[in-house]
Image (tube, helix red, strand yellow):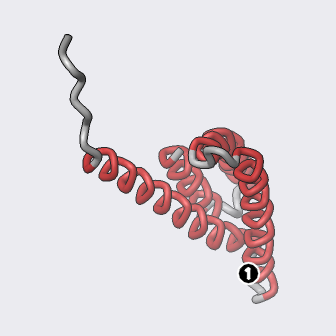
């Protein structure tokens, strides 16, 4: 998921830099949208794996998080336009938010690996 998020960040940055070229912008917008679709399923699975005993609440929380992300993204993109910046500047806060999401995924993975390394392995009895 972090690799997909990194591709999204790169696509958003390229969308910013190539904002004046219609065909190139369309290609990077497609890559970004495809990445978002590819990202949603692994994140939902991750949520459900960590919601043992409360899977329905975890699934609902995941949907709430996606909706909140859409609202925050629309607000930040709208602020760029309200400030009078060009349309390609809408991609900058999106890239920043995607980078923050990627960073949190990497930190979570590091935490889980460290937690697994600190957990003692129970010895199997012989016989």
- Left or right: 40 in relation to 64: left
Q: Count every numbered label the image shows and give the total.
A: 1
Residue 1 in sight: yes
| Dot 1 alpha-carbon crowd within 10 angstroms: few under 14, some 14 to 19, many 20 or more | some
- Left or right: 114 in relation to 41: left
Q: With respect to residue 34, does 95 lie above or below?
A: below
- For label 1, the SS is helix
Residue 104's spot in the image, x, y percent? 49, 62
Q: With respect to residue 97, does 79 lie above or below?
A: below
Looking at the image, the residue that sits furthest to the top is 127
Residue 35's spot in the image, x, y percent? 64, 44
Q: With respect to residue 111, does 81 lie above or below?
A: below
Residue where numbered disc 1 is placed: 80
- Left or right: 103 in relation to 73: left
Q: Residue at x 62, y 48 (%)?
A: 51
- Location of residue 120 (image quadrant): top left
- Left or right: 122 in relation to 81: left
Relative depth, front residue between 79 and 49: 49
Q: Residue at x 72, y 47 (%)?
A: 33
Looking at the image, the residue that sits furthest to the bottom is 83
Residue 31 in sight: no
Q: With respect to residue 113, does 103 lie above or below?
A: below
């Amino acid at each position: 998921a972090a690799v997909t998020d990194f591709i999204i960040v790169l696509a958003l940055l390229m969308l910013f830099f190539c904002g004046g070229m219609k065909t190139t912008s369309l290609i990077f917008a497609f890559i970004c949208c495809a990445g978002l679709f590819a990202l949603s399923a692994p994140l939902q699975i991750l949520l459900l794996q960590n919601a043992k005993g409360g899977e329905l609440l975890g699934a609902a929380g995941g949907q709430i998080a996606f909706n909140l992300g859409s609202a925050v993204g629309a607000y930040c993109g709208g602020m760029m336009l309200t400030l009078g910046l060009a349309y390609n500047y809408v991609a900058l806060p999106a890239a920043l938010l995607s980078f923050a999401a990627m960073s949190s995924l990497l930190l979570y993975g590091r935490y889980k690996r460290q937690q697994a390394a600190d957990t003692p392995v129970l010895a199997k009895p012989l016989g």
